[in-house]
Amino acid sequence: MDAHVVAPAAVGLAAADVILADLGVSSMQADTPERGFSYKEAGPLDMRMDPSRGEPASELLARLSEEALASLLTMNADEPHARLIATLLKQKALTTTHGVERQVRTGLAAALPTLEKTDVKMSVRRTFQALRIEVNGEFASLDSLLQSLPAFRAPGGRVVLLTFHSGEDRRVKNAFKAGYRAGVYSAVANEVVRSRKEETFANRRASAAKLRWAVRAPTGYGIGSE
């Protein structure tokens, strides 16, 4: 997610009745090897949503200490083997997607021989997720969006957010619950909405999607309101 929050007034609207935010990464970006988002094909370790600005993932890996990298893997992806993976990633310079995938996969298998192959694969995926989130400042963008939402919606307005991993969903859930307790929202989703079996079979990427919604209180005051 590389979100830029735009107020309704900036596009000639007093307030929004409905806001829908899809926080997923573009499939077109993920499937382009040159962008470095996926290890399915070889590519440079970049991961920037906007290649014209910011620091690519290869430079991030080179700059961070092992301790900082372990913290990043835990905070951004809930990786259970964060400390070990951080050690593996700092053993040598890594500049390609296949290089990172191979280093994590073979390193985990050697250090934890009883670890299931599916668990190793999940750790590789979480590693890529954590790096992408950090490179693009995705959590900071999401936090900014969540703070701005109440002021952008008309009383009774709805917001629907579609997230794709636990870190995003946790932020959305906590923000909605806090808004409900403060009287900003009159109702919030108590449970996430997941894709149905038919949709998941048709689009495997939908399996990770979690949808939450909230309704702004009819007479409440949102953040930024007077």
Image (cartoon, rainbow, N blue to C red):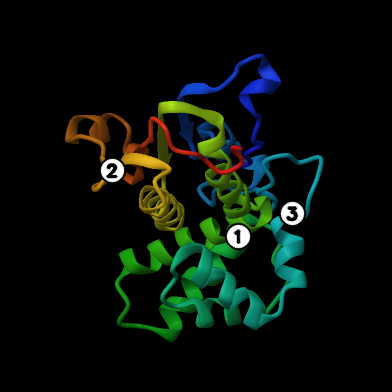
Real-space Cα separation, disc 3 to disc 1, in angstroms: 9 Å
Label 1 element class: helix
Whether 133 is drawn above or below 31: the answer is: below
Give the residue drawn at x 57%, y 42%. Answer: 145
- Image position of 173 (left or right of 147): left
From the image, tell me which residue sits under label 1.
131
Whether 30 is drawn above or below 108: the answer is: above
Q: Which one is in front, 42 or 15?
A: 15
Residue 212 appears in the figure: no
Label 2 element class: loop
Closer to the chain start, of discs 3 and 1, is 3
Q: Which one is in front, 155 or 194?
A: 155
Pick the quarter of the image with the C terminus: top right
Give the residue drawn at x 41%, y 75%. Answer: 80
The image's mark for residue 219 is none
Of the two numbered discs 3 and 2 in the rendering, the one whose residue sits closer to the viewer: 2
From the image, tell me which residue sits under label 2.
189
Asked if marks 3 and 2 touch (Cβ < 8 Å), the reply is: no
